[in-house]
Image (cartoon, rainbow, N blue to C red):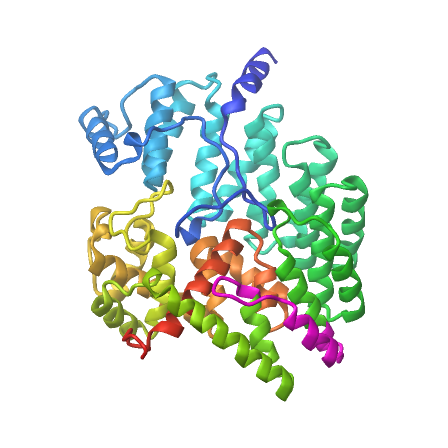
């Protein structure tokens, strides 16, 4: 017991996740699609210098030079094992990170860093999409260290792993169990809201509605209650319950919508206008769509403009006027949308049968066209490719032995990134929003959101994007894409 208390005190710096199926802390700033989302804190805080390529190379040299005869890493102090694991992890060298976590667990079984080390092992398996392998790690963590933060998070994130191996019902049960076991736990709000969407994905919408009401009662007057109302709106739309959707939309439009709620006034207005249209209330729908302001960065305004094209001559005239205003706005800001690496982008895009303007839209958001950009998650180069993704895709573009440093080379980065976008396009054809969401939030998550949306409408899909950063990313990439389509032809020649 004394040991557990000691571990509980130390676990304040333990690894934490934001792996929820609906609402998470910011996932990341760049593409690491198979790994989203990230954990919210680290037991070791690395300096900027410790996250560089030089630091990675230096750590590898130190490990190699002192490696034991059995191939195990040198025996180090616990904190040094944790530091080296963090360096490897920040560079997505997952197996090398796990080697140090395992060494710490084996050599220092009573050290307070042990729960965090177990968590790191589960985390990296999850990031590699080895969900079934991560599951027992999280389960053991929750069972063995229940009074530590890492243990509570392990218990909680069993649900995230279950959800991603198509066990939505079990995931919902786990979230609900968390609310009962840890009523004041660090993840209590997410446990309630994630239970709602897990029940939806399990095909149990009536139970989801019951859980919405329980969430509202438990968190009355808070952002979590607002999140529950938004969940009800999305559920109503998915079920084509238009009267209920309008009632819920009206209620939500009167509520405050901070970032934590993962929606905006424009998104709510779009869902309401869509519901009016689907309910056959055409005139009201036209007015509702017209009330959603359009502009160069107004994603839902753009969608509203596209819907207006389909609602009669007067509505179409309104749509054309809106488009002309936006086009003029974009042209005034043309300098903000350059087309660097044109020949390379066009060649790679044509080879992969994707729109080069979408490639530029993503590149602008990912790296700002900086070939040497590197994210804190280990993504590199113009399209922020990760070493593991590059290794997976390299054979398809006839590359071999792609090293981490190679991802800073524009030709290689653009080629591999275009191959990834092509793969996503085959998975989600005619839905660029899904490509953008996958690039930031992972295609496995997007596949679930597409199913949850039901309707083949980009705005309905985007409303289901469960990570706040990923939804913001979709909005920004699509705004970029719209601008590039206004300014450039399909071969990236400036329009006259």
Choose top left, top right, bottom left or bottom right for residue 393. Answer: bottom left
| Vertical order, 193 against 492 (above or below) | above
On the image, the x and y values in percent for residue 150 come to 55, 29
Position of the C terminus by quadrant: bottom left
- 395 over 180 or under it: above or below: below
Q: Nearer the viewer, residue 434 or 166?
A: 434
Residue 439: say if magenta. Answer: no
Asked if residue 444 lies left or right of residue 167, the reply is: left
Name the residue rendered at 57%, 74% in the picture: 305
Q: Residue at left 54%, top 44%? A: 19
Q: Is residue 293 magenta?
A: yes
Q: Report x, y in % for residue 182.
A: 70, 31
Residue most extreme to the bottom: 313
Which stretch appears magenta?
276-300
Horizontally, residue 439 falls left or right of residue 244, namely left
The residue sitting at the top extreme is 2
Return the x and y of residue 233 as percentages of the image width and height.
Answer: 72, 60
The image position of residue 157, as x and y in percent, is: 58, 40
Q: Is residue 68 left or right of residue 417?
A: left
167 vs 54, left or right, is right
């Amino acid at each position: 017991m004394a040991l557990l208390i000691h571990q509980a005190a130390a676990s304040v710096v333990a690894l934490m996740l934001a792996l929820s199926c609906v609402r998470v802390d910011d996932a990341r700033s760049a593409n690491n699609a198979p790994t989203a989302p990230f954990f919210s804190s680290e037991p070791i805080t690395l300096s900027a210098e410790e996250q560089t390529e030089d630091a990675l190379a230096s750590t590898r040299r130190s490990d190699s030079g002192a490696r034991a005869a059995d191939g195990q890493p040198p025996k180090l102090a616990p904190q040094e094992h944790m530091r080296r694991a963090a360096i490897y992890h920040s560079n997505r060298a997952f197996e090398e990170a796990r080697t140090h976590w395992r060494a710490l667990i084996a050599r220092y079984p009573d050290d307070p860093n042990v729960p965090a080390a177990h968590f790191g092992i589960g985390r990296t398996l999850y990031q590699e999409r080895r969900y079934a392998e991560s599951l027992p790690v999280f389960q053991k963590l929750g069972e063995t260290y229940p009074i530590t933060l890492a243990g509570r998070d392990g218990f909680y994130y069993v649900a995230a792993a279950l959800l991603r191996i198509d066990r939505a019902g079990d995931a919902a049960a786990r979230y609900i169990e968390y609310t009962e076991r840890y009523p004041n736990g660090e993840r209590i709000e997410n446990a309630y809201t994630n239970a709602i969407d897990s029940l939806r994905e399990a095909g149990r919408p009536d139970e989801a509605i019951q859980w919405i009401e329980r969430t509202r009662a438990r968190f009355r007057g808070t952002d979590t209650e607002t999140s529950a109302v938004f969940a009800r709106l999305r559920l109503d739309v998915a079920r084509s319950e238009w009267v209920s959707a309008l009632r819920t939309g009206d209620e939500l439009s009167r509520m405050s919508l901070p970032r934590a709620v993962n929606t905006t006034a424009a998104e709510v207005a779009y869902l309401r206008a869509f519901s009016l249209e689907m309910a056959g209330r055409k005139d009201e729908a036209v007015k509702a769509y017209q009330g959603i302001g359009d502009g160069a960065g107004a994603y839902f305004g753009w969608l509203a403009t596209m819907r207006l094209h389909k609602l009669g001559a007067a509505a179409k005239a309104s749509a054309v006027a809106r488009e002309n205003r936006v086009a003029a706005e974009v042209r005034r800001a043309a300098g903000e949308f350059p087309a660097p690496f044109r020949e390379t982008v066009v060649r790679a895009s044509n080879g992969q049968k994707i729109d080069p303007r979408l490639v530029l839209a993503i590149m602008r958001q990912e790296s700002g066209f900086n070939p040497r950009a590197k994210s804190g998650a280990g993504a590199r180069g113009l399209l922020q490719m990760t070493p593991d993704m590059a290794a997976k895709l390299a054979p398809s573009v006839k590359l071999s032995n792609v090293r981490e440093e190679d991802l800073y080379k524009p030709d290689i980065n653009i080629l591999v990134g275009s191959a990834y976008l092509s793969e996503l396009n085959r998975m989600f054809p005619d839905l660029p929003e899904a490509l953008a969401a996958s690039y930031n939030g992972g295609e496995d998550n997007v596949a679930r959101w597409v199913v949850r949306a039901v309707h083949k409408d980009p705005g309905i899909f985007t409303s289901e994007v469960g990570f706040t950063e990923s939804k913001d990313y979709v909005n920004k990439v699509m705004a970029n894409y719209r601008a590039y389509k206004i300014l450039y032809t399909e071969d990236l020649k400036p329009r006259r």
